[in-house]
Amino acid sequence: MITIAIVEDEEAYAKQLTEYIEKYQRESGKSIRVIRFSDGDEIVEKYTGEYDIILMDIQMKFMDGMSAAEAIRKRDTKVVIMFITNMTNYAIRGYEVDAMDYVLKPVSYFAFSQKLDRAIKRIPHKAGNPVIVNTADGIVRTDTSSIYYIESEGHNLIYHTTDGEIKERAKMQDAEEKFVPLGFFRSNKGYLVNLEYVDGVKDGCCIIKGEALLISRARRNDFMTALTQYMGEH
């Protein structure tokens, strides 16, 4: 199912977009869920990372669409954002927040359906396992396939990912329960490694992207068993 957020403070436009999406759904056979927000500040405050596409008005009373998009991009680099506007002069700021496109008001169904088609094709492939990480600034949506390993540091967990590091105040034990069924293994007290990225084992360490992460002596046999099993299944 595709989840689309409509962020529009004008009731008439929000209703029209909802009707267009319902029509598109009937014609395309795609399953779509729509969630409505009446201002930019509302989606930013309640952001959950569950959306695939955000249709964002630019001119709104409390927080304009550009500011809302900038706040969302700090938490979610994957969601597809498309502006619904009659203001084309925001193009440069639109590029800064990686907006996919604009739909100009008044909106025709034909133009909207064409652009929605493109937006749906831009949705990241969902074959992996989406994960929501709670950070000091809000939430970050990532995927288990983008995580190299998770490191315990004091009361925090550091996610080492393809997009850089993400810090979350959480316990390694809770992460272990969550990630082990998804192909991770706790190699010692401080590391939870994604078996997908283990390039080798050398001198009591597993090698991930050139880094040597210690495997505790007590877990060494179980680690090798888990790695062998993983490699046999993938």
Image: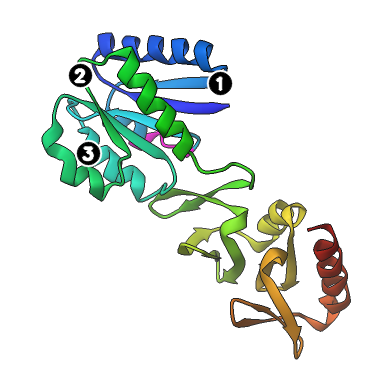
Q: What is the number of the mark on residue 66?
A: 3
Q: Are marks 1 and 3 in contact (CB under 8 Å)?
A: no
Disc 2 residue type (three-letter): Lys
Q: Are marks 1 and 2 in contact (CB under 8 Å)?
A: no
Of circles 1 and 3, the one toward us is: 1
Residue annotated with mark 2 = 105
The quadrant of the rendering that contains the N terminus is: top right
**Residue 195: percent from the left, percent from the top?**
72, 66
* Image point (52%, 21%), residue name: 32
**Residue 93: percent from the left, percent from the top?**
19, 45
The quadrant of the rendering that contains the C terminus is: bottom right
Q: What is the number of the mark on residue 30?
A: 1
> Of marks 2 and 3, which one's residue comes earlier in the chain?
3
Q: Is residue 40 left or right of residue 179?
A: left
The answer to whether residue 17 is above or below residue 170 is: above
* Image point (41%, 37%), residue name: 47
Disc 1 residue type (three-letter): Lys
* Image point (26%, 8%), residue name: 12
Q: Element at badge 2?
A: loop
| Span of residues in magenta | 44-49
> Of marks 1 and 3, which one's residue comes earlier in the chain?
1
Of circles 2 and 3, the one toward us is: 2
* Image point (44%, 26%), residue name: 4
* CA separation in Å, label 1 and label 2: 25 Å
**Residue 171: percent from the left, percent from the top?**
62, 60
* CA separation in Å, label 1 and label 3: 29 Å
Determine if the magenta segment contains residue 171: no
Disc 3 residue type (three-letter): Met
Please name whichever residue, 161 or 45, is drawn nearer the observer in this view of the structure: 161
